[in-house]
Image (spheres, coloured by chain):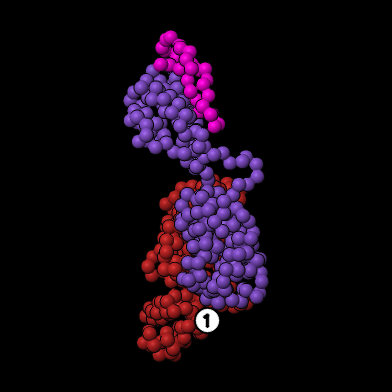
Amino acid sequence: MSSETIMNLEAGDWFFRLVDKSSSIPSERLLAVFSVTEQLLFSTKFSDDLTINPFTFDVLKNYLTSTAISAKATNPADLSGQLIILLIGAIAEELHNPESQALQNAMTAAKVIIDRACEPKRNTLKYFSAVACFVICVTTTIYWLHLNPISMQPTLAYHNDNYHVKETTANEDSINPFIISAIFDLQEKVREGVCPAPHLLDIPQGQMIAYMNVINFRHSDNPVADRENLQAFLTWYNQELSRECYYPRMSGYAKVSWR
Amino acid sequence: MATKMREYILAVASDLFSTNGINATSVDTIVSKADIAKVTLYKYFKSKEDLILEYIHQYDERMWAKLSSITSLQQDPASKLSALVNGILDWISETDFNGFAFINASVEFPLSESLVNQSSLGFARALRNTLLELAKEAGWSNAEAIAFQLVMVIEGAAITKKTQNGAGAIKHAKALVKTLIDSAS
């Protein structure tokens, strides 16, 4: 067997059917490619006829890429390219040294890169929103220490599927952190497809700019105006669009499959 | 003069081995390409196996010399390990790369009792041990696993580069290496 003769997937879809049967979760199917390959290598029936060529390489790459897309990988093509290298290296090692448990070891490495590649983006957003809220809270506190008087005024905060009016303290010259938090929460729900995106042309320019400033982490040139614009924007969204938000069930699965 | 002739024959044979494969290169092909008499070849190398072993040995020496120069520029074990693996991947990315001699030889001589097979596994073992030592020095708890995984990435990149003529193999391999090292650190 030459170094090119590694794996033959031309026999048909059976390889991918075995992988598909292993799990309904895409990221687990990416891992299953390794375990199914290991099973095949242990079978003399197949290990005598394992070849890889540009055609089978492309078939495998396409399968991995489409599964990586289903797994919501940040860059599916990169992930599939990395998995192929790992898989081929593991197969070569397994053939050189069948006792090495190369595919098991490669699967551990694959899990690391799959987890990294499929990290939910919302975590990043949550991180940034948490940091932004923290910074704003600290800034607001510092203002409180230096400015007077401290006012009590109702401000809007977005929570779950409704906007609730919360009593909180806020300086008149800064944007209330709860409003910022509400905007981030809303943006996250829009990104996840839970709530509809606001059509920015439907809202006044001032509100649009204030909204874009927050979601792009831009500093506001006019916090007082932006605060009012954001409040108005949230009120408008709550009245016009929040009813279209769809929250998936928290328990069990509500999956949509293209297969 | 004798040393130069020996080196010349070895250079011609090495080129043929890496380009056409070891088994596919006959002694006749080597003497024809080198434009020497067969008896001259046997004067310097007792057999084709002797020539193959010398080819693998020289390849390994060249590779380690290159890798040592790369790692000597780094201070800490983790940086040395990263530089070592990336250095090998850079070598694979070169246009005249035809696969590692040690991998090709071990595949062409799969029987473990073969001297060529044993010699070819020497580099792989040395590479894995070097990576393992560096990973241990770096204080990684999963040093054994990481060293083995990096060896597999290198092998996978080499095979993919050769069979797929690049296809982004080195870029993907380097990204893989970075993720694995980052996760171990």
Give the camera-side residue of A88 and A144: A144
Chain at tag 1: B
Mark 1 sits on what residue?
Answer: B49
Q: Residue at 35%, 36% (x, y): give it.
A: A201
Give the camera-side residue of B173 and B24: B173
Q: Residue at 50%, 54% (x, y): give it.
A: A69
Q: Which chain is red?
A: B
Asked whether the viewer can see residue B77, the reply is: no
Q: Is residue A86 above or below residue B15?
A: above
Report the span colored magenta: A144-172
Which element is circle 1 on? helix
Percent across and percent down for residue A258 are 54, 56
Whether the magenta-drawn stretch holds residue A178 is answered as: no
Query: Which image quarter is the C terminus of chain A in?
Result: bottom right
Q: Is residue B17 above or below residue B180?
A: below
Give the camera-side residue of A171 and A202: A202
Q: Quadrant location of residue A232?
A: top left
In the displayed structure image, the side of residue B76 where residue B8 appears, left or right: left
Q: Residue at 50%, 51% (x, y): give it.
A: A73
Query: Which image quarter is the N terminus of chain A in?
Result: bottom right
Give the camera-side residue of A146 and A242: A242
**Chain A representation colour:** purple
Q: Quadrant location of residue A236?
A: top left
Asked whether the viewer can see residue B97, the reply is: yes
Q: Residue at 56%, 71% (x, y): give it.
A: A12
The amino acid on which the numbered mark 1 sits, given as a three-letter code, is Glu
Percent across and percent down for residue A151 are 46, 12
Percent across and percent down for residue B63 are 45, 65
Whether the magenta-drawn stretch holds residue A163 is answered as: yes
